[in-house]
Image (spheres, rainbow, N blue to C red):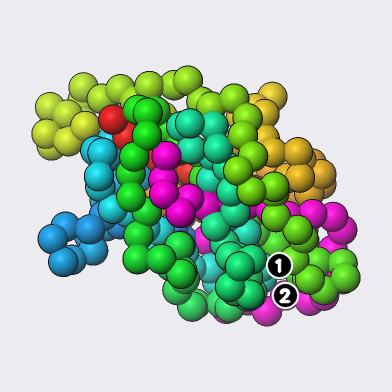
Amino acid sequence: MIRAAAVLAFAASLLGAQTHTMGEGSHRMELMLERLDGNTWRGIDPGLVLNQGDRVRFKFRTNFDGFLYVMNQSTSGKYEQLFPRQDTGQDNRIAASSEYLVPATSAAFRIAGPAGHEIVYWLVTPAKLAGGSAPAPAPSGGTRPAPVLIPRCDDTVLKARGDCVDSSAGPKLIPRGEQIPAHLADPFSKGPSDLMFLRQKNTAVISSPEPLKGPVMYEFRLAHR
């Protein structure tokens, strides 16, 4: 599991607020996975298979104002909310062009637990929630069946670079029929799913061809031995 792991909570309808963007065109989200190398944080391939004890974090940035929720399901099946941290009163509002660290209240995630894929859910909305406040997080310590997919090295990448990269890891749309936490199901069903995923060096770019008018959710599969 990722200690101090992240879990996403989101709910319900949106207010008809207008969104400020940096310019015309698509809404864009940039997500980078970093690993601590000595005393230096370095961006790594989103599909890199991590080792026990590795310390990692995410950097997140958008070109629009909105609200962010992040949630993790560990390989042990446990899930909990990471962003915003309810115990600190952390604000989940995000501003265009600003960079956010996840987790924001801890130095890093420490990789531990059974080998497999952590599933980190990212829910982003351009408008305030009805009622103007964040929803209650999932019950602390809650569990559901853990992913059973075991990381595998992509031989092509391995031969070219010497890295163990799992092509099934990294950011992607949530597969149809995948079980997700119940408190995410309603907003997820109402949000658009027409997202594009690109990679620019070690940065994953998630974009919508149209400005977001409702919540979107995607997952980041974090592979480790």
Q: Quadrant of residue 189?
A: top right
Amino acid type, residue under disc 1 in the picture: Pro
Q: Nearer the viewer, residue 138 or 35?
A: 138
Name the quarter where the C terminus is drawn: top left
**Which element is circle 1 on?**
loop
Q: Quadrant of residue 101?
A: bottom left
Left or right: 27 as drawn, with respect to 127: left
- Classify 146 as above or below 190: above
Residue 37: give x, y in percent of width and height. Answer: 16, 57
Name the quarter where the N terminus is drawn: top left
Q: Nearer the viewer, residue 136 or 186?
A: 136
Q: Can residue 49 be found in the magenta stretch?
A: no
Residue positioned 16% across, 66% down in the render: 39
Residue 11: give x, y in percent of width and height. Answer: 79, 54
Residue positioned 25% across, 25% down in the render: 153
Q: Earlier in the sequence, mark 1 or mark 2?
A: 2
The disc placed on residue 19 is 2
Would you say residue 139 is visible in this rendering? yes
